[in-house]
Amino acid sequence: MKINILLPVLFGIICIFLVLDLSAQSSKRDYYELKIYHIESKNQESQIDNYLQNALLPALHRNGIEKVGVFKPIATQPDAGKKIYVWIPYKSLKQYAGLQSKLDKDAAYLTAGKDYINASHTNPPYKRMETAFLQAFSSTPRFTESNVEGPKKDRIYELRSYEAATERLYRQKVKMFNEGEIDIFLKLDFNPVFFAETLVGAQMPNLMYMTTFSNIEIRDAKWKAFGTDPDWDRMKVMEEYQNTVSKNDTRLLYPTDYSDI
């Protein structure tokens, strides 16, 4: 009788420890939220800039998120003036899940962001908002702040999304990054900020990553070097990595003046 009573208790304890262990493991890899505001006018752009600079970023800083990226497409991009990208890193799912309730109680945030938060349906600050939620690769568990220098308006923050035809091929491309491709980026000084798997998004299965350059000329030269790198020549012909990318979505961005990275 005592054994029958104890078994559910022991099972429950084991489950708790398993959950705690999984939580501890996941916290060793960053999570990233990528918001893309689709805008239609300078007025909307101004509303979002004001909200991000004066309300959201200061509130995130108060909650332990020190480095937030805000980017816009460079002038030559087809979506220039039409989108604003916001990248928020989290050290754990717990930090992400608890953020909104903290913002709802943050008087300084609510005051500074009131125009955005309480915007009328006749004057919304954006057309639509697109969101993706990512987890850092196992080989690059934490993001790295870019060390590129020079005027922010000239910098290139290159955000790439590699889509795959199937989940298996997607996992092979992630493996390729983890087992050598990232090393090439580091060797050639691409100044990567993050490499991540998309957990929730509109174009899955896909991975995303960001590299940074002082200007477009350096960016072009780096990619030329990558294309002729002997390590890349070796990896790209390996049978296990064939047909792993069905679409490469490349976005060339620059950081706003108030962006932390």
Image: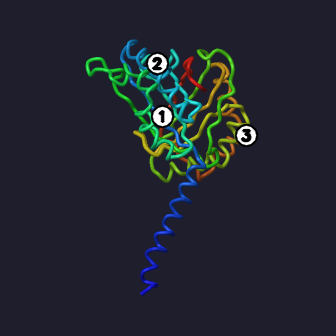
Q: Amino acid at mark 1?
A: Leu
Identified at 65% across, 31% down, the residue is 145
Q: Decide: marks 3, 1 in contact (CB < 8 A)? A: no
Q: Which of the two marks, 2 or 1, is nearer to us in this view?
A: 2
Label 1 sits on residue: 34
Residue drawn at the location 42% of the way across and 20% of the way down: 48
Q: Earlier in the sequence, mark 2 or mark 1?
A: 1
Residue on which disc 3 sits: 230
The quarter of the image holding the N terminus is bottom left
Residue type of the residue flagged with mark 3: Pro
Q: Viewed as shown, does residue 34 lie left or right of 117?
A: right
Q: Is residue 205 left or right of residue 153?
A: left
Q: CA distance from mark 3 to mark 1?
A: 33 Å
- In which quadrant of the rendered view does residue 260 lie? top right
Measured as percent of width and height from the top left, residue 35 is found at 45, 31
- Mark 3 or mark 1, which is nearer to you? 1
Tag 3 secondary structure: helix
Q: Is residue 253 above or below residue 202?
A: above
Q: Residues within 10 Å of mark 3 (few under 14, many from 20)?
A: few
